[in-house]
Image: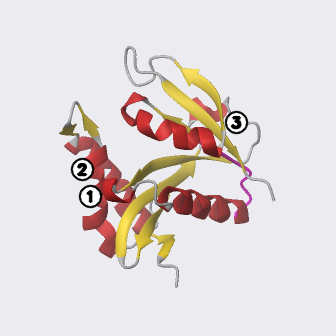
Amino acid sequence: MNTQYARQVGAGDARSVIYILHHWVRSDGTPLYCEIRTIADHIDASILGIDDRIYFVAMAGERVVGIIGYRPLPDYLCNYAETDSAVEVVNFFVHKDHLRCGHGSVLLNKVRDFVYKRGFREILVCSGPRYKDSHGFYDAQGQQIATIPNHFGHGHDARIWRLRLDP
């Protein structure tokens, strides 16, 4: 039986998700508590159905080991989309002990299937230097299409990838 799957985030997932965020959402090794709280607030609002984001968690058996969300394209990404039916992946993290086990692919495929069924045909990913370790994963999933200089501050460029959703 395959115990690796993804499902929509639920209220009982908060503690596990916060633990994962504390490992990844950092600057110079220090957790960015305000940013973690903002992400947690978006997840909570998504659960309540009052946010434009939808989140999914990766499961290893009964344990939450990853999180991913998507949202409508923000204005600054609209010029990079090739279609009028694009979304952005946000807050994509896998527990450090579960990297390279397929959970990232399970999460991304869940979003791909979910948004495709809702009429979207393109996903954009915007990531900065803090998460450069994930850039190889995005390279394998899609095509890097642009760099936005200084998007995350002086000398901190954003890279953008396109993931097409073909039938």
Farthest residue in the top direction?
154
94 lies left or right of 164: left
Q: Quadrant of the C terminus?
A: bottom right
Label 2 near label 3: C-beta < 8 Å? no
Indicate the amino acid at tag 1: Ile
Contact, CB < 8 Å: mark 3 with mark 1? no
Residue 6 in sight here: yes
Residue drawn where x is 54% and y is 51% of the image: 71
Left or right side of 34 for 124: right
The residue at which mark 3 appears reads as: 81
Residue ID at (76%, 41%): 83
Q: What element carries label 2?
A: helix
Q: Does 134 appear in magenta?
A: no
| Label annotation for residue 64 | none
| Local secondary structure at mark 3 | loop
Residue 162, position in %: x, y?
A: 66, 39
Q: Which numbered mark, 3 or 1, is in the foreground of this view? A: 1
Look at the numbered discs 1 and 2 and tell me whether their residues touch, using CB distance below 8 Å: yes
In this picture, which residue range is highlighted in magenta? 118-124
Residue 129 horizontal/vertical position (percent)? 41, 28
Q: Which amino acid does label 2 sit on?
A: His
Label 1: state its secondary structure: helix
Q: Give how far apart the Cα atoms at labels 3 and 1 are.
A: 31 Å
Using a 10 Å C-alpha cutoff, classify the residue at mark 3 as few (fewer than 14 neighbours), some (14 to 19) or many (20 or more). Answer: some
Q: How many labels does the image show?
A: 3
- Per the rendering, the mark at residue 18 is 1
Q: Mark 2 points at which residue?
A: 22
Distance between mark 3 and mark 2 Cα atoms: 31 Å
Disc 1 to disc 2, how far (Cα)? 6 Å
- In the rendered image, residue 15, in percent from the top left (x then y), is placed at 24, 66
